[in-house]
Image (tube, rainbow, N blue to C red):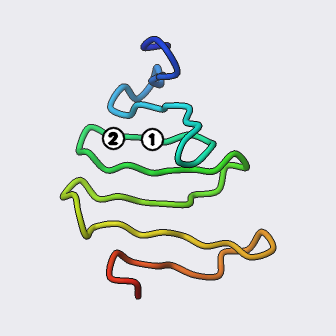
Amino acid sequence: MSLGGNKFTLRNNRNRIIEKTTTPFPGFRVTDDGGEVRHFDAAGRLIRLTNASGAGREIVLVYTGGLLTELVGASGR
């Protein structure tokens, strides 16, 4: 179901908003009602996960040759 613009919600789960993105990452993001945000690239791979708590609660997923090779937290580890 369209919410206008590039935002959609699912008929069976209106607690998540799916939004097409172009910057900083072309792809889409899914935001749940608790505030957690999942960013996906244009190929559909999860590339970033942000916790609802905000700063310092982020994980970046790094792919090499199409395979997940690294998880990097906000502290750089």
Q: Which residue is mark 2?
A: 32
Residue at 50% x, 50% y is: 39
Q: Position of residue 70 (x, y in %)?
A: 58, 81
Q: Nearer the viewer, residue 41 or 14?
A: 41
In three-dimensional space, the C-alpha distance between marks 2 and 1, rounded to whole angstroms, equals 7 Å
56 left or right, relative to 68: left
Q: Quadrant of the C terminus?
A: bottom left
Does 37 appear above or below 49? above
The residue at 25%/70% (across/down) is 56
Query: Position of 42 compared to 47: left or right?
Result: right
The spot of residue 10 in percent (x, y) is: 47, 25
Side of 46 where 58 appears, left or right: left
Task: Please tell me whether residue 48 is drawn above or below residue 34 in the rendered image.
Answer: below
The residue pinned by badge 1 equals 30
Give how far across and how far down residue 65 sits, in percent: 81, 74
Mark 2: few/some/many CA within 10 Å (<14, 14-19, 20+): some
Residue at the image position 69 percent from the left and 45 percent from the top = 42
Q: Amino acid at mark 1?
A: Val
The answer to whether residue 55 is left or right of residue 44 is: left
Q: Mark on residue 39?
A: none
Label 2–label 1 contact, CB within 8 A: yes
Give amino acid for label 2.
Answer: Asp
Mark 1 residue crowding within 10 angstroms, few (<14) / some (14–19) / many (20+): some
Residue at position x 45%, y 24% in the image: 9
